[in-house]
């Protein structure tokens, strides 16, 4: 039996509910594939602020470091929105990314045939869309120094952040982009703003240099404004997108929304090989429906499938979990966010039970 | 008779063709409304690079400064894409913005009922969409110092740009945002990334402070990633959006693409009251169809209408020009980019003639 230590960070809002369902599903998958999961839970986000004053307590980060992988549900909520930035849930998330050096964020945006009508785009435009956004996650304007709010000579305040990338940072994310495209349909689109930004010019030069090592990948480049347009105009043109932290934040959300069902989308944040990654749904903590058994657990379940695939190298177990999600959708089970006429409305727990029957 | 000096910058690609049509339309409008236009043409973009080596010759900037308003068509093309950044057409555009202190960029994204089927979004999602993006245009990461590609201590290169705003820069664009919302449906959405960026925190604080002076405007805030999602999910929720240079670049293009016909969208770039503004279509120079009488001149014509409205304070003449565009569409005239079955296909010149008949 393979033994895996998994740190669970249920977080805030609907987090604990969707995490509970996912753990049950993982246990069953574990039995089927002879995988032994040792789950350990830790505090993060608003829950951690309430308990300790810190959105990412040192023990939490340490526990994550000691595990094979981390499952994160969702963090944040109105309650903590007006705290100073250092004490906000998001700051914990940024700390986790930096602390585990999770430089590569993989965000699939895949149209599920069962849910295609949920898209605000026309069926023929989105049918078959299957995009992977590879976003750099520990650099760029999110972390660049100097940053802060400073006084100018005249006493006026000036807010400053620094958008910066070193060659090494660009190279390591570019490699993930090329390798991801290789395993997919062999097309990589690098997104930057090289017509205006020096940092993007360096980005583009390095990506082009790196492409020599991946002759089987077809590389293209788009400016970020054009990329945002093209996602709306003709999303099927994209296979894999690689881009910086801020552009990836914006484009992966736009791409996710093309599917019309962001309650279904997982993500993976990865560091160097052998280091623990973090797997979490794209959606937020939905405080308005928390504790009411209304949440959709499927993005969390699919995040666990990504964990099996990318962190634990158990592709068959991952396939099985994804198949289970596909089948409950085929059977017509729908939580409120993806409900449509003629389907079977279920809550979070009932969706979990449906998954377990497969 | 009112006398107006208008500088024309036809630029590259289809620029000269769409400018020619627009000038003819302006002449007729001038006769109808007793406005005398003195047109003077200058070089900019690729055309200026070829002639002088500089994408924005000093004489061009000086001529713009001396005029009541500037009509710009489109610049750029493959031909100049591989020149060093200082010699690229885009650099001329940034120089024009800086040189004329055009800090406010107004980009409408309006669905025209005649062209609604061109949208990739479902009719019910985009019907009636009428968004105005107010983008800061002379600050932020486009212009922030320091910037460049530097060597680190280890000899590795680091690309750097600085995303910065002073209180004064934020205040003056916020005022334009509020005033624009007041003249529209009274709703202003400020877009930032205040959960991560210090510069956005200052932005948000100042916009909130400014809102005291506009009690009749309903102010909301979105993070830029969420704004990109919401534009795709439910664009009708937006009236006026105010945001920084980079976010405005991305979001105005995404919003434009919702309409499905960016060949129809104008824009205005404005400085302090009394200083000349620049009016230009959102679309590019389309080098692939240049010189073939295939271009759609309507965005350029609508840009001239914005000039009449915002720079020359001639709202009736502006209305008349917009009505003319509306009517040629009603009559079924379509250039290739907006052609659909059953409509009358015309070229650039014929579209101009149809406009003149109204
Ligand atoms: C919550 C926020 C800090 C975060 C980000 O901007 O990275 C989120 O939007 C995301 O995309 O994971
Ligand atoms: C050409 C480029 C410099 C420009 C910008 O980024 O501002 C363009 O995309 C625009 O939106 O006008």
Image (tube, coloured by chain):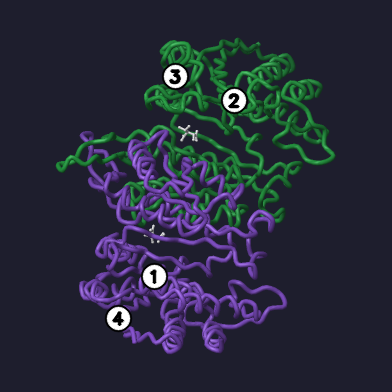
Chain colours: A purple, B green
Q: Quadrant of the N terminus of chain B?
A: top right
> Would residue A151 be visible to someone looking at this image?
yes
Alpha-carbon distance for marks 2 and 1? Answer: 51 Å
Alpha-carbon distance for marks 1 and 3? Answer: 48 Å
Q: Looking at the picture, how far across and down is residue B178, in whole percent?
A: 50, 42
Cβ atoms under marks 2 and 1 closer than 8 Å: no
Same chain shared by disc 4 and disc 1: yes
Q: Say which of marks 2 and 1 sits in front.
A: 1
The numbered mark at residue A340 is none
Does B269 appear above or below A316?
above
The numbered mark at residue B55 is 3
Which residue is labeled 4 in the image? A5
Residue at coordinates 72% horizontally, 53% vertically from top-left?
B123
As rendered, which of B310 and A272 lies closer to the eye? A272
Which residue is labeled 2 in the image? B307
Q: Are there few (<14), some (14-19), or many (20+) residues within 10 Å of tag 2?
A: many
Same chain shared by disc 2 and disc 4: no
Q: Are there few (<14), some (14-19), or many (20+) residues within 10 Å of tag 1?
A: many
Left or right of A190 in this view: B292: right
Local secondary structure at mark 3: loop
Which residue is labeled 1 in the image? A279
């Amino acid at each position: 039996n393979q033994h895996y230590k998994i740190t669970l960070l249920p977080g805030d809002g609907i987090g604990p509910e969707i995490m509970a369902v996912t753990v049950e599903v993982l246990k069953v998958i574990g039995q089927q594939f002879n995988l032994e999961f040792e789950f350990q839970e830790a505090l993060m986000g608003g829950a951690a602020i309430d308990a300790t004053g810190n959105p990412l307590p040192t023990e939490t980060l340490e526990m994550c470091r000691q595990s094979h992988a981390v499952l994160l549900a969702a963090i944040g909520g109105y309650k903590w929105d007006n705290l100073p930035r250092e004490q906000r849930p998001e700051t914990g998330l940024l700390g986790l990314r930096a602390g585990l050096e999770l430089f590569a964020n993989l965000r699939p945006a895949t149209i599920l045939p069962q849910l295609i009508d949920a898209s605000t785009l026309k069926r023929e435009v989105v049918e078959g869309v299957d995009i992977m956004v590879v976003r750099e996650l520990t650099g760029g304007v999110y972390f660049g120094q100097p940053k802060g709010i400073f006084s100018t000579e005249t006493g006026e305040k000036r807010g400053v952040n620094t958008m910066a990338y070193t060659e090494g940072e660009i190279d390591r994310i570019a490699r993930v982009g090329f390798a991801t495209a290789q395993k997919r349909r062999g097309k990589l689109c690098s997104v930057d703003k090289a017509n205006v930004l020096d940092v993007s010019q360096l980005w583009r030069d390095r990506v082009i240099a790196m492409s020599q090592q991946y002759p089987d990948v077809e590389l293209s480049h788009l400016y970020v404004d054009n990329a945002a347009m093209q996602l709306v105009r003709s999303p099927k043109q994209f296979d894999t997108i690689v881009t910086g932290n801020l552009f990836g934040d914006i484009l992966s959300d736009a791409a996710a929304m093309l599917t019309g069902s962001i309650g279904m989308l997982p993500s993976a944040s990865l560091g160097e090989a052998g280091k623990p990654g973090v797997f979490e749904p794209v959606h937020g903590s939905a405080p308005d429906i928390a504790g009411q058994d209304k949440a959709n657990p499927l993005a969390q379940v699919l995040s666990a499938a990504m964990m099996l695939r990318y962190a634990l190298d158990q592709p068959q177990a991952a396939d099985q979990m994804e198949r289970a999600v596909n089948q409950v959708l085929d059977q017509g089970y729908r939580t409120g966010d993806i409900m449509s006429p003629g389907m079977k409305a279920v809550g979070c727990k009932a969706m979990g039970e449906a998954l377990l029957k497969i």
